[in-house]
Amino acid sequence: MLFKLALSGFKNKFKDYLVLLLGLVMSISIFYMFETLAMNDAFIKENSMISAVMFIFQVGSVLLAIITIAYCLYANSFLFSLRQKEFGMYMTLGAKKSKISLLMFIETVFIGLFSLIIGILIGIVLSRVVGDALMGQLDFESTSYQPFYLPSMLVTIIFFAILFLLSAGANLIQLSKVTVLELVHGESKAEHILIRKKNIVIQAVISLILLVIGYVSMIYIEKTQYIGIIVALVTITSGTYLFFATFLPLFVQKLREKQLRRSKKINSFTYAQLSFRIGHLSRVLATVAMLIALGMGAIAVGFAFKNNGPLMVEKQYPYDTQISAQTQEETHLLQQAGVDETADYHYKVTADKIYFNEAELKEQPPLVVQTNREQKESKQVRLTTPPRVEDTSWYAFMQGMIPPDVLDQQQITVLSGDAYQQMQADETVVTYTRLNDFMDNQDTLKKVEQLETDRHKGNPSYYSTSKYSTYDSYNSFASGTVFMGFFLGFAFLTMMASSLMFKILTGATSDIRRYDMLRKIGVRRELLVKSIYKEMFFIFLFPGIVGFIHVAIGMKMFSFLLMEPYYRFYIPVALFLVIYILYYFITVSLYKGIVLTKKRA
């Protein structure tokens, strides 16, 4: 009997459940995908670079798990409020709280099982698509990678099973604290605003202070380090909730008072609607603002790491290739790609010293990177001054020419042109080349890199420090951050949308009577539609602005990791705006379909 009631309740409220189930299913599917990519040992062993990327996905799983826990507890409290009147009627008819508790437990397990099955199926598809895309980015193929991976499936099932049990327990505790009367009349409670000027001013100041502390911690993260991250997390979260609890009700009340004085069309009704449910809206919108910050931030950070790759190698490596005893095949490949500049530098090695030709270095001033530590700036300059070993720029240039095993044992010495020519020792020539465009010639540089690797196969101490190998390694890591950022961002934004849409749509049923009354007294449907658009616009606007500010300042945290954390920042912002506006119109459409009756013929 209880199972039939639970199934019946799920069917009757399926449209309401669907909004939150979407967020839960996406969370499960992305969690499973992250775990599959992070735990597949055979996949990792086939490519040494993949291990760093797998670590990124494991971090993504942890972040997603933390947010999902908060989301599930939050969603279950709404599901409880959705069914509380029905539970109250059962108890009025004689049902015991223990039976209602069991009914809630069955419903939670059923919803969890349904979400897990759908989520894992979607996760398998995502694992295949993302795995193939990642291998394409890293330019390798795996014969052992399987999107259907049992260990990751077990981790996903265990984690979410525990989460659903915790959610069921939270609902049982909530049920034990309410009376039958509160259950029956729970949906009809109005959310009144009681604003005391003194209290709200104090709370508003505290919220601003908390936000400023959090922002300062993020801006100076290089000094605050791990403590700064914890401080920012606590202060920005608490500051955001307090900000919405103080400024939002006050702002809406002021707007309502202004419209009441003007009595312009039905704007007073619009703001009265906001005012009526502002108590819970402030908490929901604060949650939405944080999810927006996390979602947009995850996408922005992923794109920033990817976009900063070319900037990083261009500033660190003045030349595209630096090859000792360059072969004719390598020279031919580079010339075909389009050479902008090339220079040969010679050095001689004896038992205890390495000699450079001062005349050659003056004739062909090399490009080097000079760093101003005080201003934290790097720039490429020509070394036109006489070469001195103690000069860090010259020394760095010489280090780049000489194998590490040779450099560790010999002393560097600079000789005049004649003295260098008279020195009897083995000579090596290093060819430096700048191409017309580094990024457009990745295929050519890859071939040259492979030729160099094959040439030094017999040397166990050889490892490549070329511009291409550095960029290739960084690009592997950056590819992981892009995938993680995109899917984490998508998961957070889905949770954001489902939380906001659920809160709005669950209150829509009680609004039908008010809109029907306005229709009966002669208010045109067009005005009611305009009122809905305006009301939803304000609801979406506030968390969108606050979330964007959090991200815009939070990107400063990565200034010590990235050369330009805001490089092409407009891309993730534009992507978020498209998704957010889409959610806005979907919510308005669903809300209109509930509160506005169809036009009569």
Image (cartoon, helix red, strand yellow):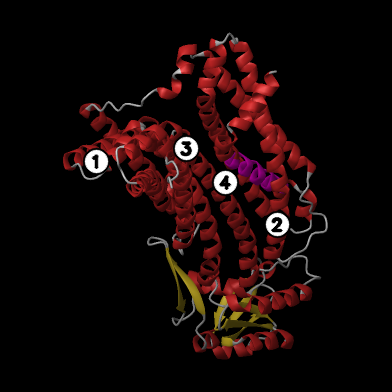
At mark 2, the secondary structure is helix
Q: Is residue 19 left or right of residue 41?
A: left
Precedes in sequence: disc 3 or disc 4? 4
What residue does disc 3 label? 505
| Tally of numbered discs | 4
Q: Nearer the viewer, mark 2 or mark 3?
A: 3
- Amino acid at the residue labelled 1: Leu
Label placed on residue 255? 1
| Residue type at numbered disc 4 | Ala
x, y percent for residue 34: 67, 47
Mark linked to residue 491: 4
Can you see residue 513?
A: yes
**What span is colored magenta in the figure?**
22-36
1 and 2 marks in contact (CB < 8 Å) = no
Residue closer to the observer: 414 or 17: 17
| Amino acid type, residue under disc 3 in the picture | Leu
How many angstroms separate mark 3 from mark 4 (CA)? 21 Å
Nearer the observer, 66 or 78: 78
Percent across and percent down for residue 115 are 66, 37
Mark 1 crowd level (few <14, some 14–19, many ≥20, 10 Å Cα): some
Quadrant assignment, res 373: bottom left
